[in-house]
């Protein structure tokens, strides 16, 4: 039986330099898309992070940069002593259901930790409307040996890497999105192809 994670990212330990660097690289992508969406809408937008981590660091950084936007974060465990201007929700991502749609949804290095991949794509779909975009990042399959080696020599947390349930291929990301009624409108790898990002939108049509 696959063990299900019951703690938020960053709850049990201090992140290493390499992990912080990776987080900044992923967040840079989100920042660009939020800025672009604000420019198009010319008004504050609603942003959702699925798997925001115990300390909600991504959302706190984004709130400082985009103070007029409304930010919501969901994770299995949340530090109750953090930012009052952000809506943090303590919930299991497999069970939580959004009560509205968001303009930008992002899930960074989360899906590889989950036991129910299809549910995560469905959750993203439930959080989007026709004008929304979603951003999902995940390590590529070839990252496994690199991450395992870095964990073995103590440069990143071994428990974190051992919690990875799978490494999605590009096709795996596209198929997961398709089954949830989403389409991948942009895809690229980064960090010397060890990470990948897919930009998702509601699919314009579905094949039977």
Image (cartoon, rainbow, N blue to C red):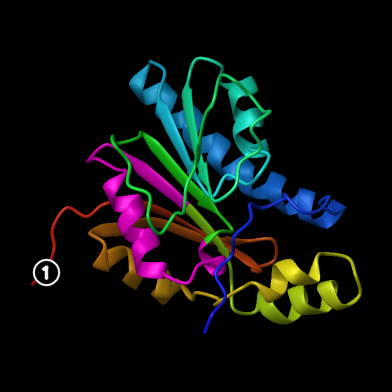
Residue 134 falls within the magenta-colored stretch: yes
Q: Is residue 13 above or below residue 59?
A: below
Q: Along the line of sight, which residue is nearer the eye, 36 or 168?
A: 168
The residue that mark 1 highlights is 207
The crowding category of the residue bearing disc 1, from other C-alpha atoms within 10 Å (few below 14, some 14 to 19, many at least 20), is few
What is the x, y in percent for residue 177? 32, 63
Q: Quadrant of residue 83?
A: top right
Q: Which residues are magenta?
A: 111-135
Q: Is residue 201 visible?
A: no
Residue at 50% x, 15% y: name it.
Answer: 68
User: In the picture provided, is 168 more to the left or to the right than 11?
Assistant: left
Asked if residue 139 is among those painted magenta in the image, a careful observer would answer: no
* Quarter of the figure with residue 63: top right
**Residue 176, x across and y down, in percent:** 34, 69
Of residues 120 and 176, the one nearer the viewer is 120
For mark 1, give the secondary structure.
loop
Residue at horizontal 46 percent and vertical 49 percent from the top: 135
In the displayed structure, 180 sits above or below 132; it is: below
- Residue at 82% from the left image edge and 56% from the top image edge: 18
Would residue 81 be visible to someone looking at this image? yes
Q: Is residue 190 shown left or right of residue 203?
A: right
Quarter the C terminus occupies: bottom left
Locate residue 183, reporting x and y percent. Answer: 29, 58
Tell whether 173 sits left or right of 157.
left
Q: Position of residue 6 (x, y in %)?
A: 59, 60
Q: Is residue 1 above or below residue 134?
A: below
Count the labels in the image.
1
Considering every residue shown, the one lying at the far left of the view is 208
């Amino acid at each position: 039986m696959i063990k299900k994670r019951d703690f938020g990212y960053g709850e049990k330990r201090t992140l290493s330099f390499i992990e912080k660097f990776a987080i900044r690289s992923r967040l840079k992508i989100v920042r660009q898309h939020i800025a672009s969406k604000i420019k198009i809408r010319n008004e504050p937008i609603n942003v959702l992070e699925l798997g925001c981590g115990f300390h909600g660091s991504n959302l706190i950084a984004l709130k400082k940069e985009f103070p007029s936007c409304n930010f919501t974060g969901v994770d299995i465990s949340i530090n109750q002593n953090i930012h009052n201007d952000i809506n943090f929700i303590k919930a299991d991502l497999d069970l939580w259901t959004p009560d509205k749609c968001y303009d930008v949804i992002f899930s960074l290095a989360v899906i590889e930790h989950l036991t129910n991949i299809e549910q995560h794509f469905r959750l993203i779909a439930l959080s989007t409307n026709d004008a929304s975009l979603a951003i999902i990042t995940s390590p590529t399959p070839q990252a496994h040996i690199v991450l395992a080696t870095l964990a073995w020599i103590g440069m990143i947390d071994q428990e974190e890497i051992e919690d990875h349930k799978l490494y999605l291929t590009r096709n795996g990301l596209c198929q997961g999105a398709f089954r949830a009624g989403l389409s991948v409108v942009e895809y690229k790898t980064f960090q010397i192809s060890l990470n990948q990002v897919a930009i998702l939108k509601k699919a314009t049509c579905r094949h039977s």
